[in-house]
Image (tube, rainbow, N blue to C red):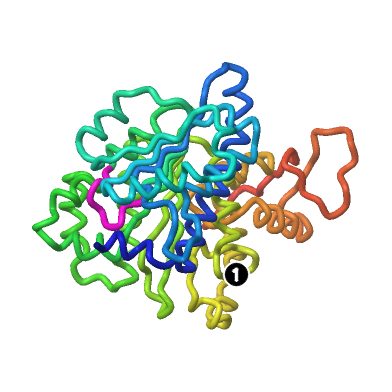
């Protein structure tokens, strides 16, 4: 009944979530397709909690948006395999009907596959034991049942495989203190981590609690093999966090692409640094954000992290930006100002003259050694 209610009305948050997923699928498929075509294989989109395909207002949800994208692209329609699963019979029946009447669906070489089933131990075994073609997987359960580290690890373990999952903080936060759902929390965080997390949450403020839960979730995923993890937070109109969309990849390129997509869906930014949060309330509090100075923080961190080293702009970005909110543009802006202020020295290894007011990725940046003390 709760899941049915979810699809009755499309909310702003659902639109943002769908845009992030579809935009990444488009970008990911463009990166993956040349290799898929070279080796004459396939690529896949997997949705483990697909729903009925449309909201009650008639607007398309993620499965139909993905298929519309594939129908419009001849290269994609030739190679794409899609799997849409849901535990609810009525959802799968409705989704199948919507797919069948989707304009141009006959252009797809591989008919979309709709299945009904719980995401359980069998699903965990399947994804961990089966070699997947390059796949982008969306895991969007209403609560937390069926969401586990093993499932996430299974869908990203092979080359070209990325995943986005819905982390329902509103349900998971109280679940960590509820012995009745301890099994689900252990599947999500791992038994030892879940136990330690419960003990460490006592006495924390709501903000500290959210940060710790998210930090532990990110660490658990990385330990399982998800090298790059990027969370995007959603808040309700009163400004309280409700859930997160968490992206997982083994590729820095995928991480960077998703970072750019999520940055554009952020409600606010400070000095050009995105919040990676969607909140109807944030736009009404501009003073709060104007007081933040993230670029000063970035400047100091670069001087500390790379003291005495010489690296290219691209190397600096890849080594420093992981698990931070900063985009490539932020790094170039700060490095340009540091060069102007004489804090760093910059040289080019290319013969071509550097254009004015640019900071190309190949430029070599030398940072001063740490000042000695004493």
Asked which quadrant contains residue 244, the reply is bottom left
Label 1 CA crowd tier, 10 Å (few <14, some 14–19, many 20+): some
Number of callouts: 1
Q: Is residue 36 above or below residue 113?
A: above
Q: Residue 321: percent from the left, percent from the top?
A: 55, 49
Q: Residue at x 88, y 47 (%)?
A: 355
Residue 5 visible in the displayed image: yes
Depth check: give the residue in front, 119 or 258.
119
Q: Is residue 329 above or below residue 366?
A: below
Q: Residue 354: percent from the left, percent from the top?
A: 86, 44
Q: Secondary structure at mark 1?
A: strand
Depth check: give the residue in front, 115 or 231.
115
Q: Residue 184: percent from the left, percent from the top?
A: 18, 50
Name the main secondary structure of what is drawn in magenta: loop
Q: Quadrant of the N terminus?
A: bottom left
Q: Is residue 121 left or right of residue 323?
A: left
Depth check: give the residue in front, 241 or 348.
241
Give, as a single range, the part of the protein colored magenta. Answer: 140-148
Find disc 1 in the rendering and name its residue: 270
Q: Is residue 290 above or below residue 56?
A: below
Q: Residue furthest left?
A: 180
Q: Is 343 included in the stretch rendered in magenta?
A: no
Q: Is residue 343 above or below residue 43?
A: below
Depth check: give the residue in front, 66 or 235.
66
Q: Residue at x 90, y 41 (%)?
A: 353
Q: Residue at x 61, y 22 (%)?
A: 37
Asked which quadrant contains residue 243, the reply is bottom left
Residue 221 visible in the displayed image: no
Asked which quadrant contains residue 294, the reply is bottom right
Q: Is residue 324 left or right of residue 205?
A: right
């Amino acid at each position: 009944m709760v899941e049915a209610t979810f699809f009755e009305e499309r909310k702003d948050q659902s639109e943002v979530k769908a845009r992030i997923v579809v935009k990444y699928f488009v970008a990911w498929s463009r990166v993956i397709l040349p290799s898929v075509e070279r080796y004459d294989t396939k690529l896949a989109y997997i949705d483990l909690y697909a729903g009925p395909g449309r909201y009650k207002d008639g607007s398309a949800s993620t499965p139909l948006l993905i298929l519309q994208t594939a129908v419009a692209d001849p290269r994609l329609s030739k190679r794409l395999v899609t799997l849409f699963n849901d535990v609810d019979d009525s959802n799968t029946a409705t989704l199948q009907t919507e797919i069948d009447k989707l304009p141009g669906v006959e252009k797809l070489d591989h008919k979309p596959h709709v299945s009904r089933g719980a995401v359980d131990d069998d699903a965990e075994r399947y994804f961990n034991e089966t070699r997947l073609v390059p796949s982008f997987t969306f895991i969007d359960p209403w609560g937390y049942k069926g969401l586990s580290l093993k499932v996430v690890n299974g869908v990203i373990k092979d080359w070209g495989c990325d995943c986005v999952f819905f982390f329902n903080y509103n349900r998971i936060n109280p679940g960590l203190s509820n012995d009745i759902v301890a099994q689900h929390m252990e599947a999500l965080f791992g038994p030892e981590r879940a136990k330690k997390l419960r003990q460490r949450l006592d006495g924390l403020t709501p903000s500290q609690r959210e940060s710790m839960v998210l930090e532990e979730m990110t660490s658990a995923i990385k330990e399982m093999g998800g090298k790059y993890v990027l969370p995007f937070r959603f808040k309700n109109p009163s400004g309280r966090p409700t859930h997160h969309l968490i992206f997982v990849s083994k590729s820095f390129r995928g991480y960077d692409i998703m970072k750019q997509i999520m940055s554009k869906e952020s409600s606010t930014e400070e000095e050009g640094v995105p919040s990676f949060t969607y909140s109807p309330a944030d736009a009404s509090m501009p003073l709060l954000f104007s007081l933040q100075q993230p670029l000063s923080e970035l400047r100091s961190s670069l001087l500390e992290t790379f003291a005495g080293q010489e690296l290219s702009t691209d190397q600096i970005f890849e080594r420093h930006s992981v698990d931070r909110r900063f985009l490539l543009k932020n790094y170039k802006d700060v490095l340009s100002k540091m060069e102007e202020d004489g804090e760093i020295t910059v040289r080019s290894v290319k013969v071509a003259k550097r254009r004015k007011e640019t900071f190309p990725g190949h430029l070599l940046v030398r940072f001063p050694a740490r000042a000695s003390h004493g």
